[in-house]
């Protein structure tokens, strides 16, 4: 929704200070929803003043474009740290991990405890505590930033059923579109801590659906497999932090921090954290300093923006993930120490999740395309298959039937109701057992009958048991 710029404030006697400006992308600037989110972010962040939270100074508007002015930080995100260490097959020192958790916990605890002017608790929940939103400065100060999806009392970001944040770090109750409190941030920080310890993503998978299932159902892996020197007492601390039932988690982020420090050892201080940044990321910092110096040097034309870095989240394969199977998890029994699987609740809340995310998380989408008419003759192109990540084998299976599907569309031009879905029951050996449609009326149309006949001839990847594949059908 936004873009950021490096900005320089100039004053008398050669005074200058660098800031960051964040504004809504021009094509979204008139959208009331995005304006409300930016205003909410600015209002929440502006009330906070803490060493471990990125400061927001101003919310303003220019040429009908809202922007906020924020603290400029030099250093590296925790995501950058994890990516480099993973690539080099190195492990972060336990003292570094404890030091990062301590500073981040202090920033989050301050936000969680913040009161309004009337003394009432603001009930701030960040909701997006991820490695990309945790920054470590050159001077060794950890900063929590990007309160763009934060929840607070009377905030415009509190609507029920909306899912905001990154799936791999969401608490189950947040992912299910339910009410969240500070314990959702404790869950997210627990996930981040596990990733710092193991050098692997805990729940991130190649598709949103698989990530969703991992958060909701995956048994926690054995962390000590990747850190044999990990003190035994660390495992129950981490297990409690990421319990699926919020009642089983720590009550405050400070409690989690204290419990972790007690079993993991003394946290690194600011000087030690700074030394790691300056030594391990000297090339990156030098390059960044050179780029910034070139931009702010006096006399340089300032008519074009310069992009210094892309903060986008990397693909899962760039950062190793745990691949614990969730297919055979007994969802009727709680996994030892990790809370209740919440599968029934997840399925019950699936529709609001899909609506809140604004994308088809579970679905492979078939787009049946018919080009414009030439005279009285219809020409049909093969359907387009949209299949992300590990869903591709299913898309490939349907792709082999493109010609037949296109022929169905060409022969039967009747309209399809909006939201039409084909539900395919697949046996363990990969053969369709049943194909049905919603709404039911589609089943009895010539087009529905034709599509069903084609889909029943597809051969899908085999699995451990029966599966149901949902296909959204559009013209």
Image (cartoon, grey):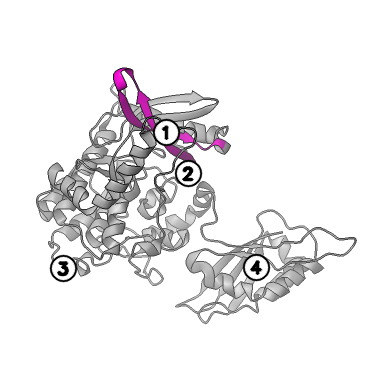
Looking at the image, residue 418 sits to the left or right of residue 147; the answer is right
First-in-chain label (1 vs 4): 1
Residue at 69% of width from left, 75% of height from top? 454
First-in-chain label (4 vs 3): 3
Residue 338 visible at all:
no
First-in-chain label (2 vs 4): 2
Depth check: 383 or 363 in front?
383
Residue 254 visible at all:
yes
Residue 341 picture location, percent across and down: 36, 60
Depth check: 263 or 467 in front?
263
Instruction: Please report contact status of discs 2 and 3: CB closer than 8 Å, yes or no.
Output: no
Q: Nearer the viewer, mark 2 or mark 1?
A: 1
Q: Which residue is mark 4?
A: 436
- Disc 1/disc 4 C-alpha distance (Å): 65 Å
First-in-chain label (2 vs 1): 2
Residue 138 picture location, percent across and down: 22, 43
- SS class, disc 4: strand
Q: Nearer the viewer, mark 1 or mark 3?
A: 1
């Amino acid at each position: 929704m936004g873009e950021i710029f490096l900005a320089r404030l100039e004053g008398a006697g050669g005074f200058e200070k660098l800031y960051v400006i964040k504004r809504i992308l021009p094509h979204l600037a008139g959208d009331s929803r995005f304006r409300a989110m930016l205003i909410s972010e600015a209002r929440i962040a502006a009330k906070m003043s803490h060493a471990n939270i990125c400061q927001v100074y101003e919310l303003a508007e220019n040429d009908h474009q809202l922007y906020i002015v924020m603290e400029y930080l030099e250093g590296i995100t925790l995501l950058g740290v994890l990516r480099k260490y993973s690539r080099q097959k190195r492990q972060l020192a336990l003292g570094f991990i404890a030091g990062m958790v301590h500073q981040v916990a202090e920033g989050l605890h301050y936000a969680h405890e913040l009161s309004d002017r009337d003394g009432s608790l603001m009930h701030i929940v960040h909701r997006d505590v991820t490695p990309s939103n945790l920054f470590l400065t050159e001077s060794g100060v950890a900063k929590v930033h990007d309160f763009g999806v934060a929840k607070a009392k009377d905030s415009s970001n509190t609507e029920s059923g909306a899912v905001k944040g990154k799936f791999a770090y969401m608490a189950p109750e947040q992912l299910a579109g339910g009410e969240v409190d500070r314990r959702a941030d404790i869950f997210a920080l627990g996930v981040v801590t596990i990733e710092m310890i193991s050098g692997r993503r805990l729940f991130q998978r190649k598709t949103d659906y698989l990530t969703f299932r991992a958060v909701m159902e995956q048994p926690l892996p054995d962390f000590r497999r990747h850190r044999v020197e990990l003190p035994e007492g660390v495992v129950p601390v981490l297990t409690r932090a990421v319990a699926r039932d919020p009642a089983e988690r720590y009550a405050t982020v400070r409690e989690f921090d204290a419990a972790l420090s007690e079993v993991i050892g003394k946290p690194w201080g600011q000087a030690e954290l700074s030394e790691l940044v300056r030594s391990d990321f000297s090339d990156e910092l030098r390059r960044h300093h050179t780029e910034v110096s070139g931009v702010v040097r006096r006399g340089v034309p300032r008519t074009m923006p310069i992009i210094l870095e892309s903060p986008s989240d990397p693909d899962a394969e760039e950062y190793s993930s745990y691949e614990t199977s969730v297919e055979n998890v007994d969802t009727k029994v709680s996994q030892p120490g990790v809370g209740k699987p919440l599968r029934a609740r997840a399925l019950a809340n699936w529709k609001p999740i899909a609506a809140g995310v604004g994308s088809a998380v579970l679905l492979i989408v078939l787009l049946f395309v018919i080009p414009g008419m030439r005279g009285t003759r219809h020409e049909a192109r093969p359907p387009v298959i949209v299949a992300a990540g590990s869903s591709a084998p299913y898309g490939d299976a349907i792709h082999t039937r493109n010609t037949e599907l296109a022929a169905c569309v060409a022969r039967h031009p009747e309209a399809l109701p909006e939201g039409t879905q084909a539900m395919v029951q697949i046996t363990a050996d990969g053969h369709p057992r049943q194909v049905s449609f919603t709404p039911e009326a589609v089943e009895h149309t010539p087009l529905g009958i034709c599509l069903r006949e084609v889909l029943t001839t597809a051969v899908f990847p085999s699995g451990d048991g029966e599966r149901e594949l949902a296909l959204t059908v559009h013209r």
